[in-house]
Image (cartoon, rainbow, N blue to C red):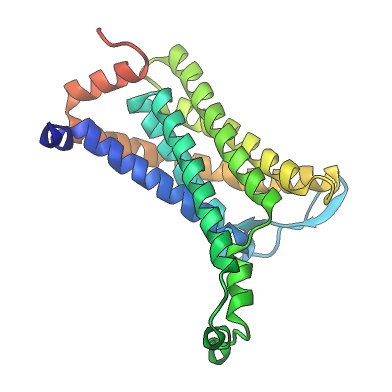
Amino acid sequence: MIQAIIKDKPTRLFVFFSAFFVANALIAESIGTKLFSLEKLMGVAPANFTLFGQSGLAFTLTCGVLLWPLEFIMTDIINEYYGPKAVRRISIIAVILISYAFLMYYLAIHVPAADFWINSGKERGIPNMQSAFDGIFGQGMRIIVGSLTAFLVSQLVDVTVFHKIKKRTGDKHIWLRATGSTVVSQLVDSYIVLFIAFSGIFTWQQILAIGIMNYIYKFVMALVLTPVIYLVERRIEKYFGPELTKKMKLSAMGVENE
């Protein structure tokens, strides 16, 4: 029985998707403490936008956004072949495991450090390894709660929008349901995390302005990565074969016999 499960192609692919999805989410949350300049990365001058009375706005993003577009692609692919229940289950598992990881980070921060280790980074320009460790892994509770809440809610929004579009378009226009669900869910994601993490710290004008700057990046990435969905779809159809692919897609829509 175990061998039959392991050899089953949909099961094997689902295990891979689940593992990649959770790992990707955990990595994105972990590296999110670092901010980077998109303009510097692209080698262009800062944008210097003015929105809601906030001037000098540029694309200063967390490193987590480098991976989140892949996460939403994975959401749409899993949704296409395994249905909304599978996406919801994986999303909940991801939130639980990320919460567990943050608990472990917290415990690791507060474990007494060895004296020699604290000063071991001086030759590399790190005067205090404990402070550096705290800075990397010690995210504020509001940021953690905001990020996890935004992730879970945006996933549920993505699933809902994806299937509402699919009911109208059928099996056609995957670009519309994939990109459409992503741009809506990313908007939700951008503002939930900002309002939970920075409400009372930033003004609402600042939150709205920062959210728009973040969303512009996410919106553009959703469009740029749309061809990736078609590439993955072709690879999956080749792996499953036309008949099994059709059955999987119908089953994901709740149509078992057709």
State whether residue 120 is above or below residue 25.
Answer: below
Question: Would residue 34 be found to the left or right of residue 258 on screen?
Answer: right
Q: Which residue: 24% across, 33% down? A: 11
Q: Nearer the viewer, residue 183 or 138?
A: 138
Q: Which residue: 59% across, 84% down? A: 126
Q: List the single residue furthest toward the top.
A: 258
State whether residue 250 is above or below residue 52.
Answer: above
Q: How many marks?
A: 0
Question: Would residue 227 be found to the left or right of residue 147 on screen?
Answer: left
Residue 55 drawn at (x, y percent): 84, 55
The image quadrant where one finds the N terminus is: top left
Q: Which residue: 42% across, 35% down? A: 90
Question: From this viewpoint, is residue 142 visible?
Answer: yes
Residue 249 drawn at (x, y percent): 31, 21
Quarter where residue 40 is shown: bottom right
State whether residue 102 is above or below residue 116.
Answer: above
